[in-house]
Image (cartoon, rainbow, N blue to C red):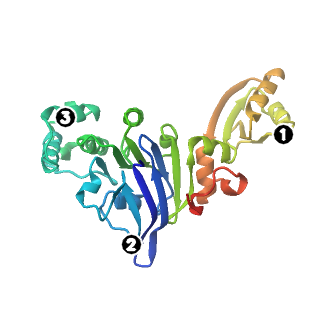
Amino acid sequence: MSAIRANGLVKRFEATYALDGVDLVVEEGEIRGLLGPNGAGKTTLMRVLLGLVRADAGSAELFGRPLHSGGPEALEQVAGFVEEASFYPYLSGRVNLELLAELDGGVGDSRIEAVLATAGLTDRAGDRVNGYSSGMRQRLGIAASLLRQPRLLLLDEPTSGFDPAGVREMAGLIRELSAAGTAVLLSSHQIGEVEAICDCYTVLRSGKVVWDGTAQQVRGAAPAPSYALSTSDDRRALEIAARSPDVAAVPSPTGGLELTVGGDGLDTFMFALGDARVAARRLEMVVSPLESMFFALTGGPQSGPAPSERASTPQPAAAGR
């Protein structure tokens, strides 16, 4: 049974369509990244799925339960938050969780301590929330979401305000939850963040799903990734690149070379540099396959033909499931 099955969701705000016929399926244990530029409809979709707003048309089921006609039971074992989680600022993190737990039917003290530890807040649990940083409030939001041991977790920009170490911790936690069977729908502007943990992706643009597929399909259908390369002899490296059919290289304004590489061309090119005794001093991916896909679909930097126009797999989700 799917954790989420939404069909044709529509949400209008006056003359603006925030959602325009959105289909979405999230399977149990799946980590799905929800991507799109500002105004694409990501947060509105999250609000609909959490029962915070009602769609104007379409339907959604959570574990087979109708969302808006199924009553409160439709959200059993579903948790999450939209944008920044809100709490009583003059109460401690622990007391906020105790109040939330009481409203939700109550949990034991051990569960509260467990989620505080999971979120990395044990040492600050007794402090007032108004003294928390933005990242700490997000951590408290994660702790609150885990109180009910959800089977479906909806997270909208959960690592906002996190430092790099915190982002890695959150990625590890999400992977652990997924391994235990929890489905996660993760909305983020940080493509590198979702690329590291997601099994599949749904891309929104102007309220419509413009692409839907697995991480493997992204790699197969995305435009070629881009790299920054510094060598011991950039002039010679350019000459070698000109003879490599899957490599396009140009001098970078900041020094070194900019490469666009298709297929297995990178390995062949790097071997050719070695054969010519040109040392590769730095090689860094600057636009990943997912970023290339995102830009192509949303009209951002390095946009080009949409991948669905260039490959038979996957098919655009707008065509239906």
Q: Is residue 288 visible?
A: no
As displayed, is residue 183 above or below residue 308? above
The crowd level at tag 1 (other Cα within 10 Å; few <14, some 14-19, many 20+) is few
- Which one is nearer the viewer's eye here, 112 or 67? 67
Mark 2 and mark 3 residues within 8 Å of each other at the beta carbon: no
The crowd level at tag 3 (other Cα within 10 Å; few <14, some 14-19, many 20+) is some
| Farthest residue, direction bottom | 15
* Separation of residues labelled 3 and 1 (CA atoms): 58 Å
Q: Earlier in the sequence, mark 3 or mark 1?
A: 3
Of tags 3 and 1, which is closer to the observer? 3
Residue to which mark 1 is pinned: 245
SS class, disc 3 = helix
Residue 99: horizontal and vertical position, in percent? 13, 47
Q: Earlier in the sequence, mark 2 or mark 3?
A: 2
Mark 1 and mark 2 residues within 8 Å of each other at the beta carbon: no
* Separation of residues labelled 2 and 3 (CA atoms): 38 Å
- Which residue lies at the image location 85% right of the left edge and 35% below the top edge? 239
* Separation of residues labelled 1 and 2 (CA atoms): 51 Å
Residue 111 marker? 3
- Tell me the amino acid under the disc marked 3: Arg
SS class, disc 1 = loop
Residue to which mark 2 is pinned: 56
- Which one is nearer the viewer's eye here, 229 or 287? 287
- Which residue lies at the image location 63% right of the left edge and 51% below the top edge? 314
Count of marks overlaid on the render: 3
